[in-house]
Image (cartoon, grey):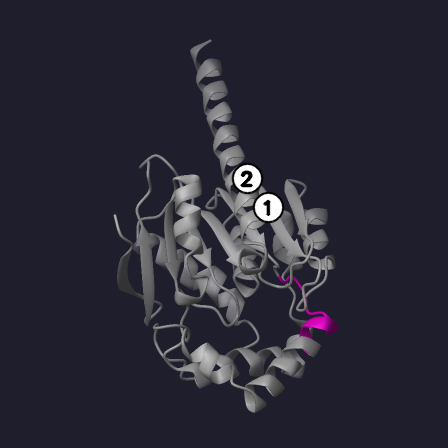
Amino acid sequence: MPPQRGDVLVDGKRLETVWIEPADKHRPTIVMLHEGLGSVALWKDFPQRLASGTGCGILVYSRYGHGNSGRLLEKRPVEFMHHEGEVVLPELLEKLNITRPILLGHSDGGSIALIFAGKYPERPRALILEAPHVFVEDLSVASITEAKVAYLTTDLPWKLGRYHQHVDDTFWGWNDIWLDPQFRSWNVEEYLPAIRCPILCIQGEEDEYGTSAQVKAVQARVPATEILILPNCRHSPHRDQPEATLEGMVRFVAAVEGNEETTRATKVAVEEQ
């Protein structure tokens, strides 16, 4: 079936969604959380390729202020990702009747997935994180400063405008808060020890927005974390190294499902004794 497009009202804001039916209704749902300047459209064909590779149902949505979701009307607070992980994402999943999803988060979306998994450790089945942020690095601030210059001096507004209905509000909503001096103390490491599900972290060797210290910090606090470092890859593995990224994700999802099947079979065997 073709992807189903829709809207859902969450936390008082209209969010655009795309749903791809699973090949097998027993497969888990993968919920995709985009980057700081991302949207449904910016994932391009990767959700369809992921659905084909895993057989899972795929939910993609644009956060408030992104894509064709509601227009951002206020300055973002330092805790905006905390709000997304603790309030918006749980409500979205409840409204769409999605239980125990695999969360696939890219950049800011990865941070939101970590917050959700630390706040509600029983709810996610697994996390797939592309270039997540757990604290602010000098490299991130420098690259975001460069992005500001590019937005003011190049055709970047036109390029981003293909993926966002209100591109100026989207860009400055992201750029202003990341460059706010108060944001330098932003940190989500406190959420990590509570996470109980397996994690796959994918990081590019040439990531211009973060170093491998980010994913190593996740692994240090969540032992069930696998790290995949990709060469010739910057901040967006699914765009820079799509084949290797997809292969890693498909393998990880299959392993998660296999482990759960083994756990269920063991539980049944114990109960029958």
Measured from the top left, where is residue 186 in percent x and y? 64, 70
Q: Tell me residue 12's x, y (percent).
A: 32, 71
**Label 1 packing within 10 angstroms: few (<14), some (14-19), many (20+):** many
Dot 1 falls on a residue whose secondary structure is strand
Q: How many marks?
A: 2
Q: Quadrant of residue 224?
A: top right
Residue 29 vertical placement versus 5 (above, below):
above
On residue 120, the disc is none
Q: Which mark is residue 252?
A: 2
Q: Secondary structure at mark 2?
A: helix
Callout 2–callout 1 Cβ contact below 8 Å: yes
- State the residue lying farthest toward the top: 273
Q: Quadrant of residue 60?
A: bottom left
Residue under the point 48% across and 60% down: 86
The tag earlier along the polypeptide, 2 or 1, is 1
Say what amino acid the circle numbered 1 marks. Answer: Leu
Q: Nearer the viewer, residue 156 or 99?
A: 156
Amino acid bearing label 2? Phe
Residue 97 seen anywhere in this rendered image of the structure: yes
Query: Which one is nearer the viewer's eye here, 85 or 259?
Result: 259
Say whether residue 108 is magenta. no
Residue span colored magenta:
133-141
Q: Is residue 76 visible?
A: no
Disc 2 to disc 1, C-alpha distance: 7 Å
Residue 136 lies in the magenta stretch:
yes
Residue 136 placement, left or right of 238: right
Give 265 or 23, whichever is nearer the viewer.
23
The residue positioned 48% from the left and 63% from the top of the image is 34
The residue singled out by tag 1 in the image is: 200
